[in-house]
Image: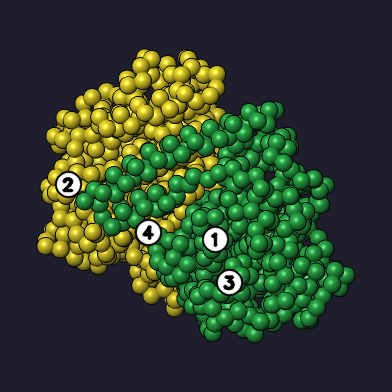
Amino acid sequence: MKIKTPAPLGNGLAPLPFKRRSVLNRRAFLRAGAIAVGLPFLEGLPERSAWAADAPPVFSLYIVAACGVVGKKFFPDALGAFSVDSLAAQTDKATSVLSPHADRLLFVKNINFPMEKPTNCGHSQGLCQSLTAAPSGGGGGTAYSTGISADMVVADAVNDGGADPLTLYAGNRSNGYIAERISFKGAGAGQVRSADDNPYTLYSKLIGLTTAASDNATAAADAAAELLASRKSVNDLVRNELKQMLSLPALSSADKLRLEQHFDSIRDTEVKMSGMGLNCTQDGLAVSQLEAFRSGLAFRMDGMIEDVAKLHLELVALAFACNYNRVATLQHGDGTDATKYPVPSNAELNWPFHHISHRVPSDSSVGSNQTAEDAHAEIDVVRMQTLLHGLDHFEARGLLDKSVILWTNHIADGPSHSFKNVPTILAGSAGGYLKQGAYVDAGFVTNNRLFNTLIAAAVRDKTDWTSNFGNGVDSGVLDELLA
Amino acid sequence: MKTTPGAAGAGPIGAAGADAGEDGGAASLGIELHGSPQYYRVVRLTNAQWAQSVQDILGLSNPSGLEATFQSPVAGTTDFSNNELLLDVNQRSWGDFQTAAEKLADQVTASTSALSKVYRGTDSTGFIRTVGRRAYRRPLTAAEISTYSELFKSGSAMSGSKSEFAKGAALVIRALLQSPNFLYRTEFTADDEPLNGFEIAAKLSLWLRGTTPSDDLLDAAPSLIDPDAAAELASVMLDEPSATTVMRRFHGELLHFARFGTISKIGVPNYNESLNAEFEQSSYLFFDKIFSESLGVKDILTTTSGFMGPGMAKLYGVRQTSSGFVEQDLGPERVGFFSQLPFLTLNGLNGDPDPIHRGASINFDMLCASLGPPAPQLPPIPPLEPNQTNRERITTLTGGCGGTCHNQLINPVGFAFEHYDGMGQYRDTENDGLTIDTGGSYEFSDGARPFADANELMQAMADSEQAHLCYAKKLASFSLQRDIVPSDAALIAELSEISRSDHGSVKDVLTELVKTDAFRIHTPGAQ
């Protein structure tokens, strides 16, 4: 039976694919779009070119969604190759929504988290394992990871100067129970990285707002050079002050680490126009929606989460196209997500997603309400529509063949909170490294093998991480995923 | 009183009493103390402190709002978001501060009038001394003045149509606002020595005023090394409106007011989502009054006064003529904050009471009880059967899974509120006339106390040592911006005794805290 198609959420976003633009020179970039693009964005471009270097870069986006999927209505029934038409024909499966990009997709069955099963709150423990392939410590609101997450490993290897990855969040940070929990600096409490929930934050960094564009290209270049020189002066002053502080004998080891982190965060970057990508423009961005969040994100539980996720995905595509960063994560939903999705089967229930996933209107994890299961399947379709929106933007910016996008979940399904056969979608070939247009069985391996493969795809160099990331069973890449 | 700082860790629940022994009193304190404080000497300003500080340093007429897109601290990993563990500078936040500093410098040097609000004169050295002292929260050294003078010269020579003074000032402001001396509140005084007057001034001002010290306070700062002078200044600050604003953050995070916005009811006719904002605002008003009128924990637990908007007034059955918020006496059936609508409705399962969450919340937030994480597989709450009370239903449900947590801690507290349904409405009977049993007993740290209903439970809590210890611990954690651990046991016991005294107010507790070594002497971290 075909899953009911949910109504579009919100006011809808910019239709795609958007019109491809010509190669930008710096001046054209400064004038692109309705909003003047300023110098901070250009200054932020890393030295390395995305396209000029001998080894083309691979961009990595890891998405972790919430509360599981309805397994029997998610992936195709049969393993093996699929095409645009064959995937589109499976209208009773949520992933059929992605059929326009079927030849850039790889569905993976039987990927497990390291922990056999939850020992307390499965949501928080699942989040902590989703990108770390390491068991969770603690539980509930204080859960933490026992290892570094893959986005940090990849960013350290592929970003200029090892710059940190983008860390984004679509959900209600005020829910107060389990907010951001997927990106970790390392093992132990206090290592989780803060995420940006307001898309305007990244948008403002990308477009730059401090300096108006100039019609005079030479004058603009001179102004940019002068701004960079003055920043260098300020940075030098700050570095000297940090050095003086670091020399104080009273400092603890923790103080020194904190100040050293500050010191290492200071960057003197140069304008490198040759590093700009062909599709580094504002075209296709939902600018009016982004501008609406200028004064803050008042998050609502009415399905707004999908609009926020779409905006994040648009901006990640832009950030990658401009070589602003090569790695990003997006946590899509709270640990106990309270969104009341406006899908047909939830019209009468009006339950928050967490309860729908449990099939019972409470925190109890064992329910059997069939209407709730139907609603969950419809929510899966909505989330695939959001992913499709992102893939469209990646495609429009010419990024799909240069990227790998992972879509996974913090548990396999709602009622069981299982850590086995966690849904795994890969989009993009990572420069021809990954198999495409197929649904494969990984064979109940732990997700350390998945990340060995994804790190190898991004780094293209054999490291300890490509063999032994995380804490799972066995080591090395997954041959089933390779082209 | 001198406390004995020591290693971080956790202390067990012990017998009643507050005697601080060699172990810092951990073994004899009535609540557990967990945490991993690092005792940082460099604690970054919170986003709110940064915003108010730049407004005051630069004489801005209105808030800049720039902090709205700053990196936020990770939610939920510490009791409060101002904890030292969360306040560092990383790549992301460095970019935030750089961009904001450049924007503000550009803004306040765009016109002579704007720049005159930062500094009235036109001499570079005077500018550096004056604005630098506000930013660094201490006078600049001669070497620092020299460095900034060179920077001023460099800025003056930059291109652009502004005056040389404005361009020099702009570059200096950019540097000052990115300096670690501005971004971090520092405590560099040697171990075992009292913080110097400027460190005390900064600590008090950023804490109770939420901003950098004023010029007047900096003038008086050297005298603050005297504990009595510092306590006197704290008393003055505590009566200022800014302190009420700061304490809103404390109570809002302590009792999770942000969760009111997530309330959702199904099939409850007298609920609509517009009530959520009323619940939040009325809660803030309740605690504004507690703080500003020098009330304390006993009042939180036992007052019959509450605030309400129009929607809440209908639910309370109170005639309200104003469209805004009013304070009303709610009568003897509603004793304390936890018998009022916001808490009861948040912790209601649609129209039914939710004794599990009511009990767990009070145990966590007001009694600092140690409850483990929830079980991995929670059974569904079964339908209420004929001739079965909600209490009987929950008792049966949790009988096999909770052990001590449910049977001795969560359920007794939650059942005390069974007279209030999921919308906080008082009911005499339930399920077609069944009698409601709200009685129970709770094993407080200083002994078991029986109670007949929520009113008696609140009074028992107000009389107990444990509620005051818990509040003192949370208040100290927020005020000192760190985890509270067993070595703080004597401090917590002392603050708790003040809270528990006849008229112990929140302000009294805070004033006492300023006098303690925990506030005045930096606790060394691990080398």
The spot of residue A318 in percent (x, y) is 68, 50
Subunit bearing disc 3: A
Residue type (three-letter) at the residue carrying disc 1 = Ala
Name the residue at 54% across, 78% down.
Answer: A467
Q: Tag 3's secondary structure?
A: loop
**Residue at the disc numbered 4:** B364
For the residue labelled by badge 4, is the local secondary structure a helix, a strand or a loop?
A: helix
Which amino acid type is shown beneath numbered disc 2? Ala
Q: Nearer the viewer, residue B433 or A346?
A: A346
Rendered image quadrant of residue B244: top left
Chain designation of label 1: A
Q: Which residue is mark 2?
A: B190
The chain assigned the colour green in the figure is A
Residue B150 visible in the snapshot: yes
How far apart marks 4 and 1 lie (CA) works out to 39 Å
- Residue A155: image tag: 1
Q: CA distance from mark 4 to mark 3?
A: 49 Å
Q: Chain B colour?
A: yellow
Q: Which residue is mark 3?
A: A461
Cα distance between the residues tagged 1 and 3: 14 Å
Question: Observer-nearest residue: A266 or B76?
Answer: A266
Asked whether the beta carbons under mark 4 and mark 3 sit within 8 Å of each other, the answer is no
